[in-house]
Image (tube, helix red, strand yellow):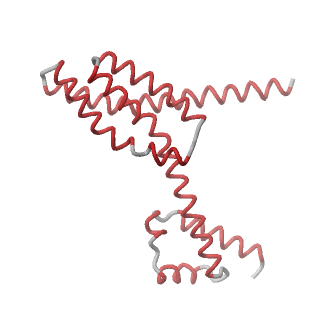
Amino acid sequence: MTKEKKIQQGRDLAGKLFDLKLTALELMTEKEQDRWRSLYPGLSKREFDDIRRQVIQAKMAQQSQIGWQVIPRDLAVIVGSLASYFINLKAGLIASVAALTLLEILFHFFYNPKLYKVLSYAVWLTYPALILLALAIQNQFAIWWQLAGILVGVWAGSFLLSMLLRVALAAIFREKKATKITKNKK
């Protein structure tokens, strides 16, 4: 088998394996591995294992980069909930919007996989923070439907504002890049 065909088989295998779930890749039995190797006979066991390992690493990196984008939202909800509980709802709203804006900008420029592993636990702290927010709202409003409406608004609004901030940042950077290119041409 030529080197080009072997490389093409490796690419094809990597593409097919990438479509599998991460747990399916990690827990693949010898029987399943043999079945995959039979579909790509030009690859040795070592080459198959290497491709499988690389696909697992790529999927894990992809998951951490996607998770990195959610952390600012979670931290902003926590900050806003704490400010609402200890100060008032207006302070909580201001603190959460300010925190979300600042964190979206910082997280857009900065990515650290080690820090992600620590900050990813913020997702689980969001739920107790929302309970604190519910207690703060309940102390200020006694009607249950207002409480539910505000909590749903915080949940949905934080996702929407986070998305809008990312779109705005992308547009700003795209414009800056286009401006640099035109200045370099002159």
Q: Where, by quadrant of the figure, is residue 48 drawn?
A: bottom right
Direction from residue 52 to residue 81 in the image, left or right: left
Residue at (47% x, 63% y) in the render: 22
Give the percent coordinates (x, y) of residue 90. 31, 15
Is residue 118 positioned above or below 159 on the image? below
Reply above or below: 60 against 120: below
Q: Is residue 14 left or right of residue 32?
A: right
Q: Nearer the viewer, residue 46 or 176?
A: 46
Residue at 47% x, 83% y: name it: 31
User: Which residue occupies the foreground of this view, 93 or 113?
Assistant: 113
On the rendered image, what quadrant is the N terminus found in?
bottom right
Residue 23 image offset from top left, x and y in percent: 43, 65
Q: Look at the picture and state if 70 lies above or below 11.
A: above
Say above or below: 96 vs 46: above
Q: Position of residue 118 (x, y in %)?
A: 46, 46
Judge by depth and name the residue closer to the eye, 48 or 185.
48
Q: Residue furthest right?
A: 186
- The percent position of residue 154, horizontal first and vertical second, equals 32, 29
